[in-house]
Image (cartoon, rainbow, N blue to C red):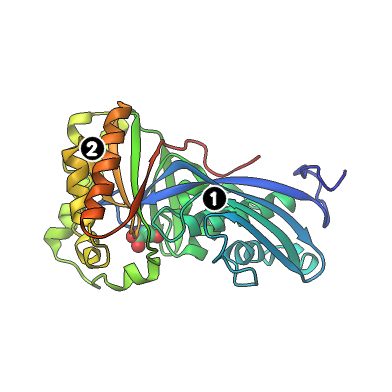
């Protein structure tokens, strides 16, 4: 086997073996499904990984975040690789890596860039050492690293996902909806770290707000599975996180309203923000209208935003 050949999972290859993994971006919460509902979308990061026996780390990034991604042991792809290796005998064998990333997922914008990095690292390292962990175990590892499953689950599995964490153990169902949607993203030009967007959340919420979200999250999943367009009205609304986060994102309320007026069936903060995701059905021209309505709404509040029109990714992380 030469250095350029992909690793055969049946044959563990020492340093020199390379593997390439593609991971989709994700949008968590989808409005009411805070920390439990997510979707994978058609924007991708690629990771090429080579493990090294010597304690040396080489990180090269092109594309999104190329100037800001740490190249030392703080690098999240490396930390995920290390977490996986240290749970096997290979932790003692492989002490370094060459990590090459080609990133298209905007960073710290609510599109799952950190989840993609974690899943990419785990998926690639696992394949190189002969796949000792199955998908459920990778999901658990990724959830433990990220702290919540709603981005890592769709990044790994594709489709829409619903996750439950029971005493630390994660369970996820991924499914494809019976309706074809476009996801229209308005991506502001400022980053919002998730920890900061979580700091503004209350420790407790009123019962009526919990009921508001539970009913909408349940209806959202049912409407997706049944493909019933008329049931999507209001299902992307939220009372648990967006009201508390709007102070961090000028133009959030205006962008959501503008998306609806331009023909979206709903819109919400994408993950912890600052991006807004709008959902449109079928016709491309509606998606285009929604994209410009949202960027104009942000602009009216002094925020520059770019737009992306994406589809559902149905595959999740895979080796290429
Ligand atoms: N559910 C998470 C949040 C997603 O809204 O904080 C961000 O990673």
Q: Which residue is mark 1?
A: 136
Quarter containing the N terminus: top right
Residue 241, numbered label: none
- Specify the farthest residue to the left: 208
Evaluate whether residue 24 shows in this view. yes
Q: Which residue is mark 2?
A: 264
**Residue 297 at x, y percent in the picture:** 22, 50
**Which comes sooner in the sequence, label 2 or label 1?**
1
Q: Residue at x 80, y 65 (%)?
A: 93
Q: Check whether the beta carbons of the residues at disc 2 and disc 1 lie within 8 A of each other.
A: no
Quarter containing the C terminus: top right
Label 1 sits on a secondary structure element that is helix
Q: Residue at x 19, y 45 (%)?
A: 258
- Specify the farthest residue to the top: 283
**Residue 122 at x, y percent in the picture:** 61, 56
Q: Residue at x 87, y 45 (%)?
A: 2
Left/right of residue 63 with respect to residue 161 in the rendered view: right
**Residue 301 at x, y percent in the picture:** 21, 59
């Amino acid at each position: 086997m030469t250095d350029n050949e992909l690793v055969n999972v049946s044959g563990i290859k020492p340093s020199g073996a390379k593997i390439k993994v593609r991971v989709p971006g994700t949008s968590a919460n989808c409005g009411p499904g805070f920390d439990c509902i997510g979707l994978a979308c058609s924007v991708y990061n690629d990771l090429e990984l080579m493990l090294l026996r010597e304690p040396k780390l080489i990180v090269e990034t092109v594309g999104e975040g190329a100037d800001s991604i740490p190249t030392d042991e703080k690098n999240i792809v490396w930390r995920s690789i290390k977490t996986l290796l240290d749970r096997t005998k290979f932790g003692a064998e492989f002490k370094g890596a060459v990590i090459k990333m080609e990133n298209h997922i905007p960073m710290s914008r609510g599109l799952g860039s950190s989840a993609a990095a974690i899943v990419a690292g785990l998926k690639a390292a696992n394949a190189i050492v002969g796949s000792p962990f199955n998908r459920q175990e990778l999901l658990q590892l990724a959830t433990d690293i990220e702290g919540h499953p709603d981005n890592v689950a769709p990044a790994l599995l594709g489709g829409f996902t619903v996750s439950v964490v029971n005493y630390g153990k994660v369970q996820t169902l991924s499914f494809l909806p019976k309706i074809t949607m476009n996801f229209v993203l308005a991506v502001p030009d400022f980053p919002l770290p998730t920890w900061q967007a979580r700091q503004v959340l209350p420790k407790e919420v009123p019962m009526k707000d919990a009921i508001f979200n539970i009913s909408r999250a349940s209806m959202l999943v049912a409407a997706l599975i049944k493909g019933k367009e008329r049931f999507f009205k209001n299902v992307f609304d939220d009372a648990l996180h967006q009201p508390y986060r709007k102070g961090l994102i000028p133009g959030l309320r205006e962008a959501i309203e503008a998306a609806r007026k331009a023909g979206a069936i709903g819109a919400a903060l994408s993950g912890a923000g600052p991006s807004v995701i709008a959902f449109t059905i079928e016709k491309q021209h509606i998606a285009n209208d929604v994209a410009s309505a949202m960027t104009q709404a942000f602009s009216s509040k002094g925020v520059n935003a770019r737009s992306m029109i994406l589809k559902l990714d149905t595959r999740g992380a895979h080796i290429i």
